[in-house]
Amino acid sequence: MPFVDEILKYKSVSIVGMEKNTGKTECLNYILRRLGNSNHRLAITSIGLDGEGLDQVTQTHKPEIFLNQGDVFVTSEAHFRTKKLDAEILDLSRQRTSLGRLVTARVTGSGKVMISGPSETFWLKQLIGDMDRYGVNTTLVDGALSRQSLGSPAITDGMVLVTGAALSANMHTLISKTAFLHELICLPEWESQQNETLLQITNGLWAVDAKGEIHDLGIESAFLLESNKDKLFTHSHTFYVSGAVTAGLLNFLRMQPGIEETVIIARDFSRIFADKESYQAFTKRGGQIKVLLHTKLIAVCVNPVSPQGYVLDSKQLREKLARKLGIPVYDIFKL
């Protein structure tokens, strides 16, 4: 399938579901099956926890991740002990997650495993870089879109987005929500020599002036903007928001003088939690949003079946979504 072949061109690719039960793990397993007989060396890890047999929220069955001989995987000590395959340990991290240290291992006998990987972006970036030493060509990351997650799928070079009836049983709504996320994923990158410095900042609002210098505005949260108006435009109309870009922030800024000069820099698309209406109201007034981390969207996969039993027309969904997004859309169960 064309999008699977495209994955081979990237050093790292995340597979990201827009909602639980949209078919993210099925998509990952499909990719692993298709690439299982190739000479392309794969590594697999996750942002957070995935691969559990039962979804802890919806209590619906979740398929496990099946790995082939020669694959490298990274998971926690707790889940390494529950693996249903034979593996050779390659490395044990010094850092710990809530489920223990991370084990890097190579599969010596095919089977199933539960994957739980690095808990934050910089650790994930380092892990992907370390895969070279094990002869890995591409690292697949089971991604997450979560306000609570400190890790971001945007750290990977490429992305496969998975959507479906679990997001909405109404096709128009499903397409609208997916198209909005697609627009966020495609936000332009903020190009500056200060990008790495900005990525190190973990809290507050900061200004970036015309010379590229970074200034701490002393505003710890977007919720404190109203009481700190006098500080806001001291240096420029370009702001780095280290946390979530919310509807409240966009609505506040679009009502201020100089909105047409205002640029918000977000860490990446997954940090934008504003609704579509607030986002469009901000951009229509002339405001811009750019990101420090930008990833290439390779393809969109759809699952027309919801856990509640709703079934959408797969062909119609794929055709309408492909026209709306301008990129290929696949149903892995129809391939």
Image (cartoon, rainbow, N blue to C red):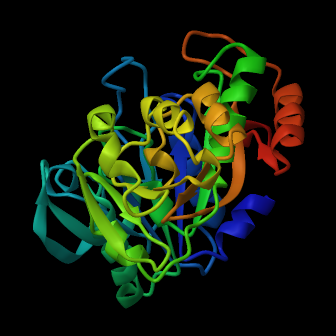
Q: In the figure, is residue 175 to the left or right of 125? A: right
Regarding residue 114, the answer to whether it shows in the image is: no
Residue located 60% across and 81% down the image = 39
Residue nearest the viewer, comparing 132 with 238? 238
Question: Residue 8: x percent and y percent?
Answer: 65, 74
Residue nearest the viewer, comparing 246 with 77? 246
Residue located 42% across and 20% down the image = 60
Question: Residue 240: x percent and y percent?
Answer: 40, 58
Residue nearest the viewer, comparing 27 with 165? 165
Residue located 65% across and 49% down the image = 260
- Image quadrant in which you'd find residue 103: bottom left
How many badges with numbers are in the image?
0
Residue nearest the viewer, comparing 269 with 213? 213
Question: Residue 201: x percent and y percent?
Answer: 27, 64
In the rendered image, the vertical position of residue 264 relative to residue 178, given as above or below: below
Q: Quadrant of the N terminus?
A: bottom right
Q: In the figure, is residue 2 to the left or right of 15? A: right
Residue located 37% across and 66% down the image = 109
Question: Residue 287: x percent and y percent?
Answer: 62, 47
Q: Quadrant of the C terminus?
A: top right
Regarding residue 193, the answer to whether it shows in the image is: yes
